[in-house]
Image (cartoon, helix red, strand yellow):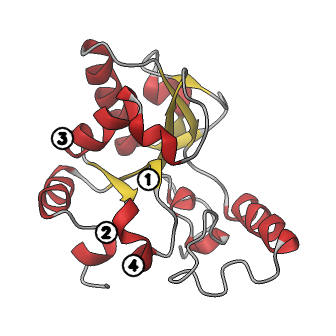
């Protein structure tokens, strides 16, 4: 990303209201993405799912760099070839969290950021319905060789209604949709 902080951020507490529990009440999200996330989580609740737990949305470039540096300290080769060895954490200017358009969503009953979330009722609902609200599952299991990121069934990216529908229906990841794959 070419900037340190996007301009359109709002508090997660304000954006989501009572639609989800928040791991970090002081967090923030892009205003449009936050409104869409609230609608999505309320729709899931109306269908008897949840409560959902939003673990993070916007992260500053410097904070994301700190997370990436910690991974490098553990493994100096971390990220050296993500298309063969997908990563979980990206550097600050490469992370979608720094845009305010990404949101990590788990369940109060399943709080682990791992592949198992996909098999929960909440995870299955998100994968099947997020596109109706402008979100895509950003890092699908069968696209790691394209995205360079592990399967993250908790990580959703706001792309708008039209793009989300097209991406979902085509079974693509964002790189494929944008012609970058």
Residue pointed to by mark 3: 132
Q: Is residue 162 left or right of residue 141?
A: left
Q: Disc 3 and disc 2: Cα gap in Å?
A: 16 Å
Residue 14 % position (x, y):
50, 25
Question: Can residue 9 be spotted in the picture?
Answer: no
Residue pointed to by mark 2: 174
Residue 161 % position (x, y):
18, 49
Residue 136 % position (x, y):
31, 53
Residue at (57% x, 60% y) in the render: 98
Q: Disc 4 and disc 3: Cα gap in Å?
A: 24 Å
Q: Would you call the spot at circle 3 few (<14 residues within 10 Å), some (14-19), or many (20 or more)? A: some
The disc, 4 or 3, on the residue closer to the chain's N-terminal end is 3
Front residue of this view, candidates 140 and 20: 140
Residue pointed to by mark 4: 146
Badge 1 vs badge 4, beta-carbon distance below 8 Å? no
Q: Is residue 2 left or right of residue 38?
A: right
Q: Disc 1 and disc 3: Cα gap in Å?
A: 16 Å
Q: Helix, strand, or loop for circle 4?
A: helix
Foreground mark, 1 or 3, reads: 3
Residue at (31% x, 69% y) in the render: 174
Q: Helix, strand, or loop for circle 1?
A: loop
Image quadrant assignment for residue 108: top right
Front residue of this view, candidates 81 and 175: 81
Q: How many marks?
A: 4
Residue at (50% x, 76% y) in the render: 148
Badge 1 vs badge 2, beta-carbon distance below 8 Å? no
Q: Eyeballing the image, is 23 above or below 126?
A: above
């Amino acid at each position: 990303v070419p900037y340190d902080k996007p301009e359109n951020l709002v508090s997660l507490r304000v954006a989501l209201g009572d639609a989800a529990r928040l791991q970090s009440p002081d967090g923030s999200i892009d205003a449009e993405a936050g409104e869409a996330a609230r609608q999505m989580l309320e729709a899931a609740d109306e269908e008897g799912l949840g409560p959902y737990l939003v673990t993070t949305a916007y992260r500053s470039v410097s904070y994301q760099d700190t997370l990436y540096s910690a991974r490098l300290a553990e493994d100096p080769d971390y990220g050296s070839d993500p298309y063969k060895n997908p990563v979980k954490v990206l550097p600050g200017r490469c992370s979608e969290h720094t845009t305010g358009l990404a949101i990590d969503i788990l369940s109060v009953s399943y709080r682990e950021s791992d592949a198992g979330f996909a098999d929960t009722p909440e995870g299955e609902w998100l994968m099947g319905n997020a596109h109706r609200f402008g979100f895509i599952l950003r890092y699908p299991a069968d696209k790691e060789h394209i995205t360079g990121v592990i399967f993250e069934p908790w990580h959703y990216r706001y792309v708008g209604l039209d793009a989300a529908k097209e991406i979902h229906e085509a079974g693509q990841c964002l790189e494929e949709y944008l012609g970058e794959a």
